[in-house]
């Protein structure tokens, strides 16, 4: 018997998760990273304590919302850890919905498979840090070459995508972001994401003051020439 995608959350409507579209957002269980600023704490650390949602339940909700939403964002956690992901996306596509994937880029083989099978319409890949600092920032062992390969796959492919970095004081410096931008030079779209204090994997970050908006806008202007599009997401 095929095991379904482990879904532990479903947001019926999001105005921000899929650029340019109204979407529902699906959250899958578990992650192979331990980024200290992550706000999906239970999904990462204790997914077994969350109520599970079957594929059939999720698909029925999406089916009922057709005409109101036109896309689905699949995030987590890290969706590409799960072998059931391609089959589930196929079922979503049969509903006539566009599919966006949020990923940390650690599973390039799965990413390539999804793209080759034309299952994705948009990909957002988090680039956590300069490649030399990845294990430190991600809080886990990281195959940096896998990250590099996922970047190459997206840059060489035809599917719309963005690279994005959450800029957390005490975790990333402005110079770190400049180095990331140089690594991604020539990419279509790069998004600088503002850190939002609150519930985080590392409790010490919960009250950290974000970088001033003006500082992020200046940094955007500095690295924007490297990309076709560069913006700040507050």
Image (cartoon, rainbow, N blue to C red):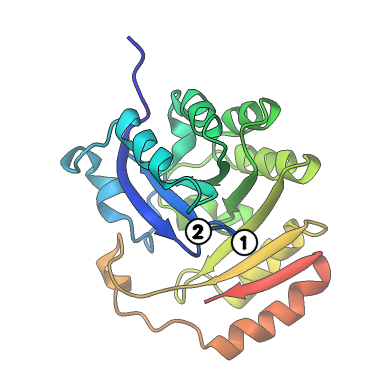
Q: Is residue 32 left or right of residue 191?
A: left
Task: Please report the residue visible at 55 percent of the width from the left and 38 percent of the height from the top.
Answer: 143
In the rendered view, tell whether residue 200 sits above or below residue 154: below
Task: Please report the residue visible at 36 percent of the width from the left and 53 percent of the height from the top.
Answer: 12
Task: Please report the residue visible at 83 percent of the width from the left and 58 percent of the height from the top.
Answer: 186
* Residue 190 position within the rendered picture, expressed as x and y whole percent measured from the top left: 68, 63
Badge 2 vs badge 1, beta-carbon distance below 8 Å: no
For discs 2 and 1, the disc positioned in front in the rendered view: 1
Task: Please report the residue visible at 55 percent of the width from the left and 49 percent of the height from the top.
Answer: 70
In the rendered view, tell whether residue 104 sits above or below residue 110: below
**Tag 1 residue:** 20
* Residue 1 position within the rendered picture, expressed as x and y whole percent measured from the top left: 32, 9
Circle 1 residues within 10 Å: few <14, some 14–19, many ≥20: few
Q: Is residue 201 left or right of residue 229?
A: left
Mark number for residue 17?
A: 2
* Residue 97 position within the rendered picture, expressed as x and y whole percent measured from the top left: 55, 41
């Amino acid at each position: 018997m095929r095991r379904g995608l482990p879904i532990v959350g479903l947001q019926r409507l999001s105005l921000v998760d899929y650029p340019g579209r109204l979407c529902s957002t699906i959250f899958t269980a578990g992650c192979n990273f331990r980024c200290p600023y992550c706000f999906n704490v239970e999904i990462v650390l204790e997914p077994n304590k969350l109520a599970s949602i079957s594929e059939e339940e999720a698909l029925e909700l999406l089916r009922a919302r057709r005409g109101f939403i036109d896309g689905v964002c699949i995030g987590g956690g890290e969706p590409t850890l799960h072998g059931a992901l391609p089959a589930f996306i196929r079922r979503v596509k049969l509903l006539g919905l566009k599919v966006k994937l949020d990923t940390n880029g650690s599973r390039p083989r799965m990413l390539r498979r999804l793209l080759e099978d034309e299952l994705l319409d948009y990909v957002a890949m988090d680039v956590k840090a300069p490649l030399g600092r990845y294990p430190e920032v991600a809080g886990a062992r990281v195959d940096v070459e896998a990250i590099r390969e996922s970047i190459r796959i997206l840059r060489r492919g035809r599917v719309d995508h963005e690279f994005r970095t959450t800029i957390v004081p005490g975790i990333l410096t402005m110079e770190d972001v400049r180095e990331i931008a140089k690594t991604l030079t020539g990419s279509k779209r790069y998004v600088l994401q503002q850190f939002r204090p609150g519930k985080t994997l590392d409790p010490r970050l919960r009250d950290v003051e974000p970088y001033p908006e003006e500082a992020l806008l200046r940094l955007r202007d500095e690295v924007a020439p490297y990309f076709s599009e560069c913006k700040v997401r507050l």
